[in-house]
Image (tube, grey):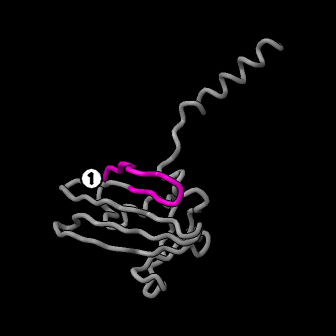
Amino acid sequence: MRRLAPIIVALLALPLLGASAPPGARALAGVQPGLWEVSRSATGQGARRICLRDVASLASFAHPRERCQRTILGDRPGELVVDLQCVGGEFARSRISVTTPRSLKLESQGIHGGEPFDMTLYARRVGPCRPF
């Protein structure tokens, strides 16, 4: 049994060796999913509340219903850069900057609805999501 113990431990660790970090793991370290207020104003004026299970999904804020392929271009502490290629030729490049674990800035530009866009949004975590 003593000889089997190290082998069992090694076999249990194998899935961890091949596991990759989720998108934005370094950039969004310490940032929790939950209820967020998102607005065009840094003051929070006119904010819209959304429940985020994946904070990195803010990168596709301008393309919420489209099927898009996300490619992580940069994932460093405090900054996530994502390239989106969507069905129908729509696309975006988004940068999420972490101001604090409860405060983010999103800069995104691309094509949506056949028109170019360039937007800056501010997100602030206000608590956990409410159960449905």
> For residue 96, which quarter of the picture?
bottom left
Magenta stretch, main secondary structure class: strand
Report whether 46 appears left or right of 126.
left
10 Å crowding of disc 1: few (<14), some (14-19), many (20+): some
SS for callout 1 = strand
Three-letter amino acid code at the position of disc 1: Gln
How many badges with numbers are in the image? 1
- Quick check: 61 left or right of 14? left
* Image location (x, y in percent) of residue 5: 78, 19
Specify start and end residues of the magenta stretch as a single range. Answer: 68-81
Q: Residue furthest left?
A: 114
x and y percentages locating residue 122 in the rendered image: 45, 75
Give whichever of 113, 23 is nearer the camera.
23
Quarter where residue 9 is shown: top right
Q: Is residue 107 above or below residue 25?
A: below
Indicate left or right for 21 with 111 as reference. Answer: right
Q: Does the magenta run of residues contain 87? A: no
User: In this rendering, is residue 108 above or below 4?
Assistant: below
Above or below for 74 versus 117: above
Say which quadrant the C terminus sits in.
bottom right
Please check the rendered image and state whether residue 70 is part of the magenta-colored stretch, yes or no. yes
Q: Residue shown at 27%/53% (left/top)?
A: 85
Residue drawn at the location 61% of the way across and 73% of the way down: 127
Q: Residue at x 76, y 14 (%)?
A: 4
Q: Which residue is mark 1?
A: 85
Q: Position of residue 33 (x, y in %)?
A: 56, 63
**At 52% across and 72% down in the image, what residue appears?**
36
Residue 24's spot in the image, x, y percent? Answer: 49, 53
> For the N terminus, which image quadrant?
top right
Between 17 and 114, the residue placed more toward the observer is 17
